[in-house]
Amino acid sequence: MKNLGRAHVEAFLEMMSAERGAAVNTLQSYERDLDDLHGFLAERSVSITDAGSSDLGAYLSGLSKQGFKPSSQARRLSAMRQFYKFLYAEGLRTDDPTGIIDAPKKGRALPKTMGVDEVTRLLSQAEKEAAEPGAHQMQRMRMLALLELLYATGMRVSELVCLPAKVLAQEGRFLMIRGKGNKERLVPLSQSAIAALKAYGRAKEAENAAAKEPVPDSPWLFPAASKEGHLPRQVFARDLKDIAIRAGLTPSMISPHVMRHAFASHLLANGADLRVVQELLGHSDISTTQIYTHVLEERLHQLVQSHHPLAKLTKKQD
């Protein structure tokens, strides 16, 4: 029976090669996966040809217990589906046992983020450099404004570099951001972001006034000699990693998108509502914002440990 099962696996591999032109690597992968399944079923005295849904489910559960990632489990299931479809098509089975088996759920990767201490170090470094007089001070003040705005609002880097110059004329504590789908949203600004923005605006005016030739007006808050006319996001991302190095941080762990995640995570950790964070980030669907639920779970755990009477009683007994 075992040899018959193996013969069916070989027939399946021949079909995949001859009829579907499967690559050598694909065939080898199918063979390894089916051989592994064959070995598992042999220990249960079940032929791979005759295995039922419960047998295959037990195999996948075993993979999970061994620590196989959902992606690896899904690949094994894919090989099984192809094999049992072949057996059904060839009349070697009257059913497909994989039909009722659900694919393992792939956990959504948690976004990389920065701790409050790391963000503080980064902003402190930018503030220190912006205060240093001399050549390129304007660029350093621009960097401080960029970082303060990014952390204060959590806006996308594409939204940040495309901010209009008229932002400088605003006196309020809120900023109107035009996001995806041309949708606008209102976000509050921190006092430090307002201060950095005003300082950048004054420095910009002073630089334009001191120029030997009239400086053409730009519609952008952060103009640059680029095709778009504003600071390219790639340039900002590169400069961000450079200042991260000077702040003693790991540059590979820091990017404009990571700072956006830090904004959201720090808000939630300090009591913000998930729906509010959704609005501030400009997510059209709450499911996109739910990648941060691990932050909420940790906060809820801390709240229970701090305020639940039984938790307090347990601490006293300890």
Image: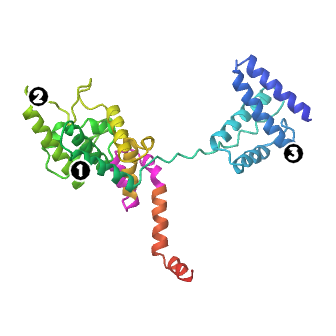
Q: What element carries label 2?
A: loop
- The answer for how far apart the CA atoms under marks 3 and 1 are is 65 Å
The tag earlier along the polypeptide, 3 or 1, is 3
The tag earlier along the polypeptide, 2 or 1, is 1
Q: Seen in the image, is 6 located left or right of residue 106?
A: right
Q: Can residue 41 be seen in this view?
A: yes
* Residue behind mark 1: 193
* Residue behind mark 3: 43
Give, as a single range, the part of the protein colored magenta. Answer: 269-293
Q: In which quarter of the image is residue 70?
A: top right
Residue displayed at 27% across by 46% down: 149
> Relative to residue 197, is residue 29 depicted above or below?
above
Q: Is residue 274 magenta?
A: yes
Residue displayed at 41% across by 43% down: 254
Q: What element carries label 3?
A: helix
Dot 2, how many residues are within 10 Å of its Cα: few (below 14), some (14-19), or many (20+)? few
Please identify the quadrant where the N terminus is shown.
Answer: top right
Q: Residue 215 carries which label?
A: 2
Q: Position of residue 286 (x, y in %)?
A: 42, 49
Q: Seen in the image, is 32 located left or right of residue 279?
A: right
Q: Quadrant of residue 55?
A: top right
Please identify the quadrant where the C terminus is shown.
Answer: bottom right
Q: Disc 1 residue type?
A: Ala
Q: Does the magenta stretch include residue 74?
A: no
Q: Nearer the viewer, residue 306 or 233?
A: 233
Q: Position of residue 130 (x, y in %)?
A: 22, 45
